[in-house]
Image (tube, rainbow, N blue to C red):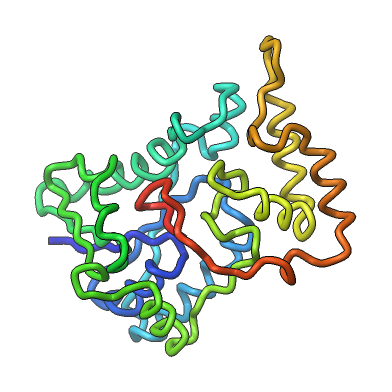
Amino acid sequence: MKKLLSFSGGVESRTMAILYGNKADAIFSDTGNEHLALYASLNTVEKKIREFHNNDFKIIKVKNEEWGSLDDYIRYAKFFPSFNQRFCTRMFKIEPIDNYLKQFKDEGVEIMIGLNANEKDMRTGNHGLLPWVKYSYPLADNGIDRQMCHEILAAAGIAPNFPPYMQRGGCYNCYYKSKKEYKAMAYMVPDEFDKIIALEEDIQDQREEYYHIIPSIPNLREFKRVAQSMMIAPEEMYSVVNNATKCGVFCNR
């Protein structure tokens, strides 16, 4: 049976790569909307883990071949993903991975999911629909919690050091991000924040009310102006906790 581990680039998936990467390659589903900081870290992390396992490891990158990026689909549909319409996870995480896994229909495949020992209640979800795919949760089953993951990564020298605007996922326009994260993003990476402004303005149609990507932030341009006028840098205000998002098992950061 082929073995793979689901890789997001975050704490738990890096830990799985260290512990089990000599037995399984990693699979990373690229939405096309990941933060530049995440893309920049992937090759470095892969190289270090390969060295750790004597070159017996690689990250397989997959994506939605029809649309290329989540932004492309949002512009086409003129519709943002949300808590109630989580098509981003389904179309740009789960489906590309499932399409890749179809090649193992005859031999079967096991894919390891990086839920830690504190996340056992997250095992159910919109994955696990292919009958020839076995999903396993080695961190949770072996009692490895998030703190232990941090300790393992520190010892291996590959602990993630994501900026404050990346506490909840790699997509730059994730609806799970908090206002604090968006504020840090507007201050620290204004070019990425400008992409959100452009995307929001591009998808407006004939709705009488302006359609916001972030309902709690009614005016992104003004929000950016205020964020950039702050006297204290966001990295001094908000600790980098790297909490895992709840948007799906393949998006955990």
How many circles with numbers are drawn on the protein? Answer: 0
Is residue 97 or residue 164 the one in the foreground? 164
* Of 59 and 119, the residue lying toward us: 119
Q: Is residue 85 left or right of residue 17?
A: right
Query: Quadrant of residue 66 in the image?
Result: top left
Give how far across and how far down residue 49 sits, in percent: 41, 79
Q: Residue at x 12, y 47 (%)?
A: 132
Q: Which residue: 28% across, 68% down? A: 117
Left or right, 170 with reference to 199: left
Residue 206 to residue 142: above or below: above
| Viewer-side residue, 30 vs 200 | 200
Tell whether 173 sits left or right of 25. Answer: right
At horizontal 28% and vertical 43% (from top left) the residue drawn is 125
Percent position of residue 219, x then y: 78, 34
Return the residue found at the far bottom: 155
- The answer to whether residue 205 is above or below residue 179 is above
x then y, percent, for residue 187: 79, 57
Locate residue 230: give its quadrant: bottom right
Which quadrant holds the N terminus? bottom left
Considering only vertical position in the picture, is 69 above or below 101? above
Q: Position of residue 20 (x, y in %)?
A: 27, 75
Residue at the spot x=10%, y=48% of the render? 106
